[in-house]
Amino acid sequence: MIIDIHGHYTTAPKALENWRNRQIAALGNATDAPRPSELQISDDELRESIETNQLRLMRERGLDLTVFSPRASFMAHHIGDFNVSSTWAAICNELCYRVSQLFPDNFIPAAMLPQSPGVDVATCIPELVKCVEQYGNVAINLNPDPSGGHWTSPPLSDRYWYPIYEKMVEYDIPAMVHVSTSCNACFHTTGAHYLNADTTAFMQCLTSDLFRDFPALKFVIPHGGGAVPYHWGRFRGLAQEMKKPLLEEHLLKNIFFDTCVYHQPGIDLLTKVIPVDNILFASEMIGAVRGIDPQTGHYFDDTKRYVEAADMNPQQRDKIYEGNARRVYPRLDAALKAQGR
Amino acid sequence: MIIDIHGHYTTAPKALENWRNRQIAALGNATDAPRPSELQISDDELRESIETNQLRLMRERGLDLTVFSPRASFMAHHIGDFNVSSTWAAICNELCYRVSQLFPDNFIPAAMLPQSPGVDVATCIPELVKCVEQYGNVAINLNPDPSGGHWTSPPLSDRYWYPIYEKMVEYDIPAMVHVSTSCNACFHTTGAHYLNADTTAFMQCLTSDLFRDFPALKFVIPHGGGAVPYHWGRFRGLAQEMKKPLLEEHLLKNIFFDTCVYHQPGIDLLTKVIPVDNILFASEMIGAVRGIDPQTGHYFDDTKRYVEAADMNPQQRDKIYEGNARRVYPRLDAALKAQGR
């Protein structure tokens, strides 16, 4: 069984974007804001948006199940206030939940949070609770920079974030640390901001003792860990200078990397440098890079091909495809077992 | 001959830091500011700081020449205004010049600029001119984020930067794109901000047509290019989506990567993915990672060992060690030829 732990609903019907645009146009003028009930998307529309896109490609590539969350670049927590984010998150999470109900064998939801810059993260907990308890979400996406490229929130090691961590530990759900659109002209969203955030989050954990406070906390760092595996020697060396334990001890009980690296040499490095127990299969399909690589004739984001070609044995590959995901996402494992899988 | 194109004067006598601290303490109170002439460092002190540190390690490792610039983390362009930066840059550049005069066979200078957030970069040109014409500098370090982690300047593709580029082209000098200390609590300076800036700068070039305006402009992206080579497929794919030419055509006539990647798998990936003509030997010794790797028993930043062990032929290795540096830094080549080297 192959589980893709990183998929976003990037192909939602256009009505969703139209509703969001109306919401944004009405910022600061609450009477003009559209009501959630004005967004009407039928099950058939959802089905079609999935069957012709993600599910089609999953079948072509032989992927069984995707952990499915709202479109990352559309979270845009920097827009509006908490109420704007709250309404928007509820809508997006409900759509992913509905997709998981329409395709229970192929999709299981992960939640975005109604974060808003400068707002107490405890305000996100009611949405989180609903998503886990009523919608069966198995993980959350946590945005370390809800300002969208201005990095005005405290580092992830700050107590500011602890209310979320407490709930994560209580539910035994991991967080994928994933930023959204950059509204800073310096940072291209998918080419710079995403990768920078991955590196930044890892380093925030490295310099802190966060996992001493939360030994059961689990972070998935997407996009192959940003720059981290490529610079693994640098990070080992920096940890050593700071008198931290070896990274295996200090971070790798709590931090995991996905395989969203879109060429063979990158996956080769990832699987060589990072212990196999810390690597989870993912493609972020359909996402930032949608084309076909002229060098291979295959989709850049068909990461299964790279994992297949990487130098490892079938047991190791099975961990990356399934075993690690079941371990890091216990609610995913439980849901699969309930289905007899 | 082995040229290290990335060394900083991280070991300057303590008097330099003391002077800087006095300058910072006097911010906003010009009468208390120390005069440059109050900084007294003798040639013997300079000699000792180099002979016992960089030069000792260069000899141990078999490195012949270092392109030597002021300590990157101490540039701190976010501190004070243009006058503060201007005085500080002049002092730091003079010290590197003096080192190059004391050790003409082993060090050749590259300049920091007196950048200041929000200030016209044309104000940096007098210092640049002095450093090239009087001090024999062969390159500059250009800080894409003089705010120190708040990223308030325009992207490198913006016309804001063009006055510097015009002067670079006139002098035929490359710029190493190198940030300084992060004063944003989210970004660890050497573990996140440096690498993020490398990735960010590359993507700023990728999304723009900067090198159409400046076909002769050359950027060296340090720290192995941040996350870029590890995600080379992602960048190829993003360029393709944006209908840009292939990266070889679009960027690699103008962008070069150094070898400051502190473990073997990283250098293996770099040399596999990036054309050999675009890789320049460097170690950033003595820099961010000063310890010995317990896995190898050698210094993390002894990057020559990794280059030696990478899969390439002697001609390719010579390009990385010397030939590419002479091509990308024509004034370095001219200076060496004047020495009969």
Image (tube, coloured by chain):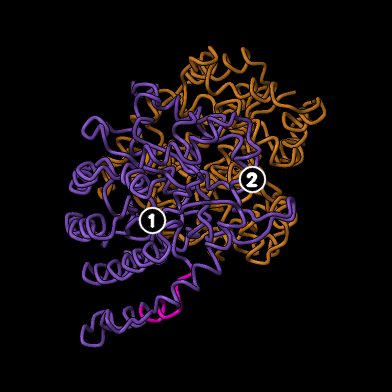
Chain colours: A orange, B purple
At x 40%, y 75%, the residue is: B43
Q: Is tag 2's residue or tag 1's residue first in the polypeptide sequence?
A: 1
Dots 2 and 1: beta carbons under 8 Å?
Answer: no
Q: Are discs 2 and 1 both within one chain? A: yes
Q: Residue B96, how many percent across, how many down?
A: 37, 64
Q: Residue A200, how many percent across, how many down?
A: 52, 52
Which chain's residue wears label 1?
B
**Which residues fall within the magenta stretch?**
B11-19
Q: Secondary structure at mark 2?
A: helix
Q: Which residue is mark 2?
A: B305
Kind of residue sitting beneath label 2: Arg
At x 35%, y 33%, the residue is: B206
Q: Is residue B181 left or right of residue A94?
A: left
Establish if A337 lies above or below B137: above
Asked if the magenta segment contains residue B18, the reply would be yes
Q: Which residue is mark 1?
A: B108
Q: Is residue A254 left or right of residue A123?
A: right
Q: Secondary structure at mark 1?
A: strand
Residue situated in front as seen by the camera: B321 or B295: B321
Kind of residue sitting beneath label 1: Ile
Q: Residue B24 got which mark? A: none
Q: Is residue B155 left or right of residue A336?
A: left
**Can the viewer see residue B260?**
yes
Establish if B15 lies above or below A63: below
For this orientation, the residue located farthest to the front is B340
